[in-house]
Image (cartoon, rainbow, N blue to C red):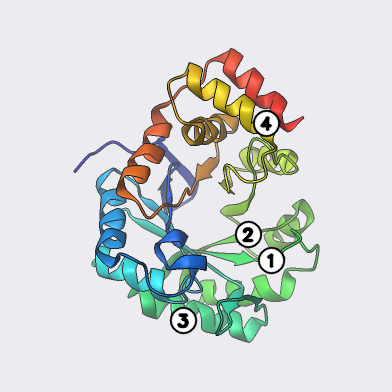
Amino acid sequence: MTTTIPGGTLTPAEGLTISRMGYGAMQLAGPGVFGPPKDRAQALAVLREAVGLGVTHIDTSDYYGPTVVNELIREALHPYPAGLRIVSKVGGRRSDDGGWISSLEPADLKVQVQENLRHLGLDVLDVVNLRMDTAEGASGASVAEQFGALAELREQGLIRHLGLSGVSDAQLSEAQSIAPVVTVQNLYNLANRADDALVDRCAAENIAFAAFFPLGGFSPLQSETLTSVAARLDASPQQVALAWLLQRSPTTVLIPGTSSVGHLRENIAAAELRLPADAVAELDAIGR
């Protein structure tokens, strides 16, 4: 097993150190993130390979499947290696037909935490993110009641650290008035730069900013620019997009997902890709 940590490590809080190149386990479920995987053995192999390649940061949620992904993580990796940090999230449920349902009642958030603990086979969760966004993006609603419920579980010892997902700058500030925030997980990539200021704020406050959908929302022209840069660097567009995110800020962390061992290796190799200044300048222009 390798001792190299892909992308290096980030320590956003006392007692929490994660690899900057993580793994997002969402795609291990069936189509639409619903039901069992098409190839269970392959799903288990991906999880074991991620850890074998030095990843110490796995992102998941009990509503992936639902329960399917957490159960796969437990089957593949339990008892968990020392240093592995599992980051889960609450705030949603699934309908019988696979629909995504917001579920933010404080009492149910506490139930969701218990479900994550049970299906992962844990007594305490390393990090729990409160997911507040809607299909349209950050809602702007108060997070006090929901985040306060999770803070209570942190005081009880069921959660070590708290984070947020799909939130605004104001919601981050409100949550911090209740308890420390170690992670923010929002949509952000080369083409979606609305959170530039929030990325910089997280860097200043040593908060891990987990950018998801690294290739989401590109126009054909933007994709052409990315493809051109990637060709010059003898890398894939996905690798370049991931490398740009790692270089964007010292506290960005990545959670690309895949159900393929080969694709996983390609993603993790992006952590070693160093973008020259001219390539960065060309890529930066995509989001302007």
**Residue labelled with disc 2:** 165
Q: Is residue 196 left or right of residue 32?
A: right
Looking at the image, do the residues carrying marks 3 and 1 touch, with CB atoms under 8 Å apart?
Answer: no
How busy is the neighbourhood of tag 1: few (under 14 within 10 Å), some, or many (20 plus)? many
Pointer 1 or 2: first along the chain: 1
Does 256 sit above or below residue 64?
Answer: above
Q: Secondary structure at mark 4?
A: helix
Pointer 1 or 4: first along the chain: 1
Q: Name the mark nearer the viewer: 4 or 2.
A: 4
**Residue labelled with disc 4:** 222
* Disc 3/disc 1 C-alpha distance (Å): 19 Å
**Split into 4 quadrants, where in the image is the C terminus?**
top right
**Residue labelled with disc 3:** 114
* Disc 3/disc 2 C-alpha distance (Å): 19 Å
Looking at the image, do the residues carrying marks 4 and 2 touch, with CB atoms under 8 Å apart?
Answer: no
Pointer 3 or 2: first along the chain: 3
